[in-house]
Amino acid sequence: RIKMATKVIKEIGLESSMSKESDFESNYLVYFYNGNTKDSSGKDESLSLNLLGSSLSVAEECDVRPTIAGKVAAAGLYHGTGHICSVSDDDSSFGLFLCLLKVPYGKQTEEQGTTDPMDTKDILIVLMHTGTISLELFRPEMEVFCKKIIPHLNALLATGYALENFSDSRVAGLLSKWYYYSVLYLDRCISFCGKHIAQLLFM
């Protein structure tokens, strides 16, 4: 059974080699999301994604946005629930994790030190990965990670924001490490346990 546990680790790709940065590329995109409606023929009429911030270049984001919009339109997203899909063509192949968040857009009250909710914004978090690891294995972790971004998005919206300043925000700092927090924790655990990981799984 110990040999079988070791084989499982290798088969699902959870060896320490997955942490090598040369093996993959991870990116993120954040959009203001305006939900789509459908006309009588079932055609989407008003789905729009307005960029809030991204780790991609302007040209790269423009290239990938139609693909993301198509995946979003087909997914039927629910707030707080992640959707995983893949994109593959002649030029590239990558996985997408889509998570729609409802972010309170509040205003700080200095006298009371509380936040007075004024509105909510639908924010779409898109996590991209070009490696061979199946994102489906880490759906719960990525959902939790995205939900933990909500307070920081709220602070960003409440204090004002500009696209050119997004890369310096706390939100960008966290999202730039999404793979580290959501996936590599398991790699670190395996590395820490070393040769005893098979016995641990067996127990």
Image (tube, rainbow, N blue to C red):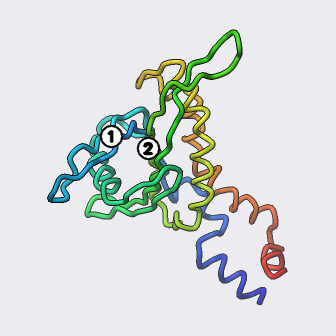
Which element is circle 2 on?
strand
Task: Please tell me which residue lies in front, 41 or 175.
Answer: 41
Task: Please tell me which residue lies in front, 187 or 201.
Answer: 201
Q: For the residue carrying disc 2, how many other residues have a C-alpha within 10 Å: few (<14), some (14-19), or many (20+)?
A: many
Q: Is residue 52 above or below residue 65?
A: above
Q: Quadrant of the C terminus?
A: bottom right
Q: For the residue carrying disc 1, how many other residues have a C-alpha within 10 Å: few (<14), some (14-19), or many (20+)?
A: some
**Can the viewer see residue 168?**
no
Indicate the position of residue 9 as horizontal and vertical percent values.
Answer: 66, 76
Q: Earlier in the sequence, mark 1 or mark 2?
A: 1
Indicate the position of residue 168 as horizontal and vertical percent values.
Answer: 54, 25
Task: Please tell me which residue lies in front, 54 or 148.
Answer: 148
Residue at the outermost left position: 41
Q: Is residue 109 above or below residue 58?
A: above
Reading the image, the residue beneath label 1 is 49
Specify the quadrant of the image occupied by residue 191.
bottom right
Give me the residue at 63% from left, 22% from top.
115
Circle 1: residue type: Leu
Give me the residue at 37% from left, 59% from top.
75
Circle 2: residue type: Leu
Residue at the outermost bottom position: 1
Which element is circle 1 on?
strand
Indicate the position of residue 2 as horizontal and vertical percent values.
Answer: 78, 86
Residue at the outermost front position: 40
**Can the viewer see residue 14?**
yes
Horizontal side, residue 93 vs residue 135: left or right? left
Give me the residue at 59% from left, 44% from top.
177
Reading the image, the residue beneath label 2 is 124
Q: Is residue 169 above or below residue 178?
A: above
Give me the residue at 36% from left, 37% from top.
57
Specify the quadrant of the image occupied by residue 147.
top right
Q: Are marks 1 and 2 in contact (CB under 8 Å)?
A: yes
